[in-house]
Image (tube, grey):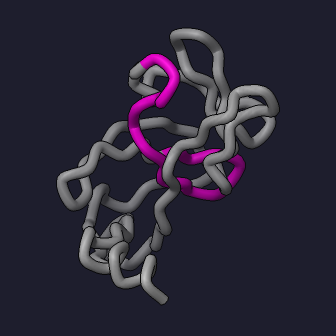
Amino acid sequence: MNWYKVAELIDIHKPFIKKVKAGGKGICLVGYEGSIYAISATCPHAGAELSGGWCREGKIICPFHRYSYNLQTGKGDPGQNDYVDTYPVEVRQDGVYVGVITFLEKIKQAFK
């Protein structure tokens, strides 16, 4: 897994949603209730930028059709039958980092 610095230090007690890039991927960085989450930046249902949405009850809500995704697991609400990718986040002394698994690592995991 490769780690990418995506932001300077952030006050995790103030909610935020912002789009960042890590390893060539668009990622939605979300500060919610004292934690930071990283999920895919685009809604799989309609292609909306999730950074234009809002959070409620531990989920990010898509601004287009109000589909919602769990910030921890990426699972969509029952009946949606979809999900967004989630990424590990580390807050270090010099900023916020997101971990991205390379394509080669994904292939190796598939054959374990």
Which quadrant would the N terminus be assigned to in this image? Answer: bottom left
Instruction: Give the x, y percent position of residue 99.
Output: 37, 70
Image point 55% across, 54% down: which residue?
A: 37
Image point 26% across, 50% down: which residue?
A: 25
Instruction: Give the x, y percent position of residue 111.
Output: 43, 84
The image quarter containing residue 54 is top right
Q: Is residue 55 left or right of residue 58?
A: left
Image height check: is 45 above or below 1?
above
> Outermost residue, left direction?
24
Image height check: is 63 above or below 50?
above
Residue range in magenta is 30-46
Image height check: is 50 above or below 12?
above
Image point 68% across, 36% down: which residue?
A: 76
Instruction: Give the x, y percent position of residue 98.
Output: 38, 65
Image point 80% across, 36% down: which residue?
A: 57
> Outermost residue, top direction?
64
Viewer-nearest residue: 29 or 105:
105
**2 magenta-colored:** no
Image height check: is 52 above or below 16?
above
The image quarter containing residue 77 is top right
The image quarter containing residue 9 is bottom left
